[in-house]
């Protein structure tokens, strides 16, 4: 999704740049009466075209993202349906998916184990005691440095 937002930002930046170029061209092409007829009209048409291109690009990116999501869901459903029965070109992909899923489960279990060991309700008390002891040591060193 971040790529989509970057493309949109880039497209809008291009539109701003083109609008500035067109406005500077218009100022240079002012006729005797102080109007900018032909240049203004061409500039307005270009600005409309750039705005339409930006809208179309946004819609294109949205549709592409939706199609990617649908393909992902199809693959997930097929994997769940055919798990353990994959043949042909799907067999190595299924094996890779199983290996990756196992690695994810192991990592998740390790995270939960560390949380259970480390992040207990009493864990904060240990830190408070350590900080208090540290403050005492610092205060004693400061007093010693001052000769107190």
Image (cartoon, helix red, strand yellow):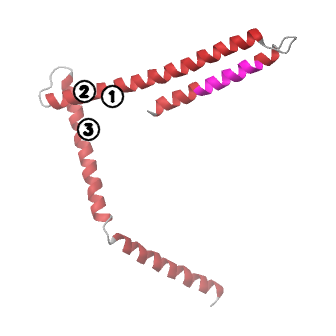
Viewer-closest of 74 and 63? 63
Q: Which SS class for mark 1? A: helix
Q: Residues within 10 Å of mark 3 (few under 14, many from 20)?
A: few
Residue segment shown in magenta = 12-24
Which label is found at residue 75? 2
Sequence-wise, the earlier of marks 1 and 3 is 1
- Disc 3 designates what residue? 100
Please state, as top left, top right, bottom left or bottom right, where the C terminus lies in the image: bottom right
Indicate the secondary structure of the residue bearing disc 2.
helix
Q: Residue at x 12, y 31 (%)?
A: 84
Quarter of the image where the N terminus is located: top left
- Checking the image for residue 69, the label placed there is 1
Residue name at image x 24 percent, y 46 percent: 105
Instruction: Where is residue 5? Give x, y as percent.
Output: 50, 31
101 and 68: which one is in front? 68
Main secondary structure of the magenta stretch: helix
């Amino acid at each position: 999704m971040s790529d989509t937002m970057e493309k949109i930002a880039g497209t809008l930046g291009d539109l701003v740049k083109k609008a500035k170029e067109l406005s500077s061209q218009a100022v240079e092409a002012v006729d005797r009466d102080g109007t900018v007829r032909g240049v203004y009209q061409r500039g307005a048409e270009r600005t409309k075209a750039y705005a339409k291109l930006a809208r179309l690009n946004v819609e294109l990116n949205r549709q592409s993202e939706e199609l990617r999501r649908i393909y992902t869901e199809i693959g997930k459903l097929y994997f769940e349906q055919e798990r353990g029965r994959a043949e042909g070109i799907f067999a190595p992909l299924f094996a890779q998916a199983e290996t990756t899923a196992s690695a994810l489960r192991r990592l998740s279990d390790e995270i939960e184990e560390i949380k259970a060991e480390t992040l207990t309700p009493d864990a904060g008390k240990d830190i408070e005691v350590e900080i208090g002891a540290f403050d005492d040591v610092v205060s004693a060193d400061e007093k010693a440095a001052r000769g107190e």
